[in-house]
Amino acid sequence: MDKLTVDNLFLSYGTNPILKGVSFELKAGEVVCLLGASGSGKTTLLRAVAGLEQPSDGRISLDKQVFFDGANHIDCPVEQRSLGLVFQSYALWPHRTVADNVGYGLKLRKVSSAEQKRRVQSALDQLGLGHLAARFPYQLSGGQQQRVAIARALVYNPPVILLDEPLSNLDAKLREEARAWLRELIVSLGLSALCVTHDQTEAMAMSDRILLLRNGRIEQEGTPAELYGSPRSLYTAEFMGSNNRIDAKVMSIDGERVMLKGDGFQLEARAKEALQPGQDAQAVIRLERVQVADGPGANRVPASLITSMYLGDRWEYLFHCGDLRFRAFGHTPRDPGNHWVEFPANDCWAFAQAS
């Protein structure tokens, strides 16, 4: 069983550092998503693993095979790493048929014609493309082209498949369907996959573990549930999910409990980092955790409902409370007016105010 290991990887474009000491492991049969905003370094990291970018220092290995070692001047070329690559653009040859596109890597590896045909047909059948083998890319839909690109990456049974924003060229509805069958495919085939995405919903749906990158470093790593439910920083809390961000001042602290005060409200929250009385703070709470209440009570504030927006499976409410603007989800339409709204203390996280 192969394990991909990246150890203390550095990479710069000229004088601009992109990766600043990134380390992680990808275990056999595991799906890891590299998640982050544009410029965080996630695609550069994937390309460095693939051999398409050259780091300045660090080490990349797959089990006992060393792909890159800055200290020992080892840099294994792309074709010798035998990793499956799925690019954002799909990179299909327009003048080759589906079968020829999928089988090209086998041809380069001098696999016999009979074996090429068998493995290409098997890969296409796995992805529901067996009947399209003779077509050209321009005769396929976007979703079908994406599957061809994945089939091409899988056909020679690579130990790890690398996917760079594999669903980004699909429309929103097809993306939802595609991430489900892609996850199913990866799990059913027992693949090890490293996937780049900027979409946190996509990352949570597809991965066993998420590496959240920020400015060339890993901000936090863990299961989707850990990053969503137990963020260790304000950046992680805000990046994952739909949130309300509340500016307030720390009044008092009791263990991990902190009392916050703002314009027209007072809230108890869980301190996620060291805070001091009198310090400016920011609280974060997921929209689905905010609740419209039936009257005053603990951690409830009076607020004016400005409007309700129908989203199909739920309603989204927009509230005002003094200078505070916040949103909430619910399952019933509500008329504008005054309400009591609860911010459950366990779901309200307090961080030092970002500079």
Image (cartoon, rainbow, N blue to C red):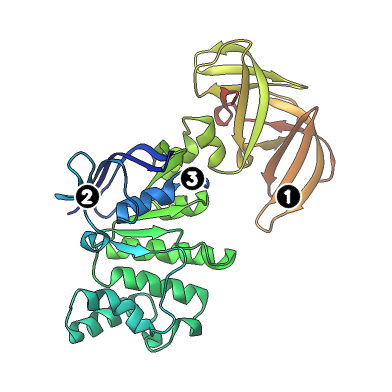
Using the image as rendered, state which of residue 349 and residue 291 is in the foreground.
349
Using the image as rendered, state which of residue 308 and residue 94 is in the foreground.
94
Using the image as rendered, state which of residue 325 and residue 295 is in the foreground.
325
Residue type at tag 1: Thr
Residue annotated with mark 3:
36
Q: Position of residue 158 (x, y in %)?
A: 24, 64
Residue annotated with mark 2:
3
Tell me if residue 298 can be seen: no
Q: What's the residue at 32%, 45% (across, down)? A: 55
**Lateral position of residue 1 relative to residue 96, left or right:** left
- Is disc 1 placed on a helix, strand or loop? loop
Of the 4 image quadrants, the one containing the C terminus is top right
- Is disc 3 placed on a helix, strand or loop? loop
Mark 2 or 3 closer to N-term? 2
Using the numbered discs, state the Cα–Cα distance from disc 1 to disc 3 in whole angstroms.
Answer: 34 Å
Residue type at tag 2: Lys
Q: What's the residue at 49%, 54% (across, down)? A: 202
Image disc number at residue 332: 1
Residue furthest front in the image = 14
Tell me if residue 235 can be seen: yes
